[in-house]
Amino acid sequence: MAACHVVFLPFMAYGHMIPMADMAVLFASRGLQTTIVTTSSSAHRLTKSIHKTANFPHQIALHIIDFKAGLPPGIDNPDHIISNEHMYGLLEAIPTLQEPFEQFVEKSQPNCIVADMFFPWTTETAARFNIPRIAFNGTGFFALCVSDAVSRYQPTVSSDSEAFVVPHLPHDIELTRKQLPRLEGEEFKVFLKTIIQAVEAEAKSYGVIFNSFYELEPEYVHHYREVLKRKSWHVGPVSLCNKSTEDKLERGKKSAVDEHGCLEWLESKPAGSVVYVSFGSIVKVTGSQVYEIAIGLEGCDESFVWVIRNDQEALIPEGFEARMEAKGKGLIIKGWAPQVLILEHESVGGFVTHCGWNSVLEGVSGGVAMVAWPIMAEQFYNAKLVTDVLRIGVSIGDVEWSADSTCEGVTREAIERAVARVMGAEEGEDMRKRARELKEKANKAVEKGGSSYSDLTTFIENIKEFRENTTK
Ligand code: UDP
């Protein structure tokens, strides 16, 4: 029987494309035929992943589709976007991808579609061609369970800062209203509609695939499957399919630092002594916040690697970089960092993170303790998993969900305090020990016989069964 053909349709943001490209590599490594469908402005990001599968029975294929009316450069890809208005322009144009996508599906007759939450209409495509649609949300079980519980519950609190316990979850998860997404008003109409459609499409899908592993959030795997009654598979951490330095170096984008220089710098530091600071690919850090981070990091006892976007270079305090270089205390990466390579380096012991799901998983896979500094999306839920459930990190403090992805308002003292806690003795050592144990479990999960390896086997069997039942 021919190999199953799985088509991946990732949303074009780095945080969605990178894990889906890794997932395609993983599927190809298990002998499946895979195609990634994307737009021309994002296709170049997949070159490396495709190359990684050159020696597999089926190399990943690429198929390009484009927006019907074309989109002006700057809004054709979420990572070029600077305003919410532009983002909504992109979201409104997304349904025009349905027609060229369906033409491709009709011609290539795949056995399954793994589609991002931002393409809810793929449930119609799947129904039309009688193949399973698998949803990919780019987050973990915990976040989806909390999000579901929060959406059904109106807390009786007297202010946005008063904590409430989210009901009907395996743990007592405390949140405040100001940590929840706020999508009220005309301004957020398009985004809210997209989210509602995504949730509805998830429920109608054949199942949901997760970049996660069982041992990380077992109670929430059960809750999702047995209480929310959704079919699901966990196949992560998918970043662990990148074995060589070369693979880790360039995920999604070419790194802005020389690999040798970066590794040499890390190697000059004692094990577990460096803090890595990054806010992912979307968050905008304000000028005053860049300043506070710089001074905060200078005040910490530890060495650091700090990733700032290249358009923020001018915001670094004068003389800071030269001082850090002279003392060998800080490495500043302006642009794209080889994040997985850094987090897996033994000199790194802590991670100041915005809690994007990929970053959390990559931190877990690196065995580092985290300072959770969530900004937007479902990051506040991910932060709770890190601090309250896994107890491998501390919160940066009282921060509020930002509708425009802005990172601001945290003082240098709060940064110093939080870093000192995760990097320090006793409390810090306990967190780092738990983090190292999770790293081991993550690696075991993706090995032959591990929980993620086995769940991918189940996934492949389920897709084959579906095919057999429909061809009978
Ligand atoms: N990333 C990277 N280098 C950077 C910034 C981000 O390699 O300088 C990668 C990171 O390893 C992760 C992804 O981009 O895989 C970001 O996803 P995440 O969910 O952490 O955050 P988002 O960017 O979606 O907010």
Image (tube, rainbow, N blue to C red):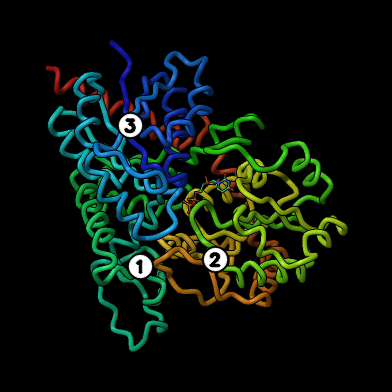
Amino acid type at image mark 3: Phe
Q: Earlier in the sequence, mark 1 or mark 3?
A: 1
Distance in Å between CA atoms under marks 2 and 1: 15 Å
Residue sitting at the far top: 1
User: Which numbered tag is attached to residue 373?
Assistant: 2
**Is the residue under label 1 in contact with that under label 2 (CB below 8 Å)?**
no
Label 3 secondary element = helix
In the visual, does 460 lie left or right of 425? left
Residue 419 vs residue 162: left or right? right
Q: Three-letter amino acid code at disc 1?
A: Pro
The residue tagged 3 is 459
Mark 2 or mark 3, which has the lower sequence index? Answer: 2
Most extreme residue toward the bottom, as rendered?
158
Characterize the local packing of mark 1: few (<14), some (14-19) or many (20 or more) Cα atoms within 10 angstroms.
some
252, above or below 298, in the image: above
The residue located at (53%, 23%) in the rendering is 52
> On the picture, is 307 further left or further right than 360?
right
Q: Position of residue 255 (x, y in %)?
A: 63, 40
The three-letter amino acid code for the residue at tag 2 is: Trp
Quadrant including the C terminus = top left
- In the image, is residue 76 above or below residue 109? below
Query: Which residue is located at x 46 percent, y 29 percent?
Result: 26
Name the image quarter holding the N terminus.
Answer: top left
The quarter of the picture where residue 259 lies is top right
Mark 1 and mark 3 in contact? Answer it, CB < 8 Å. no
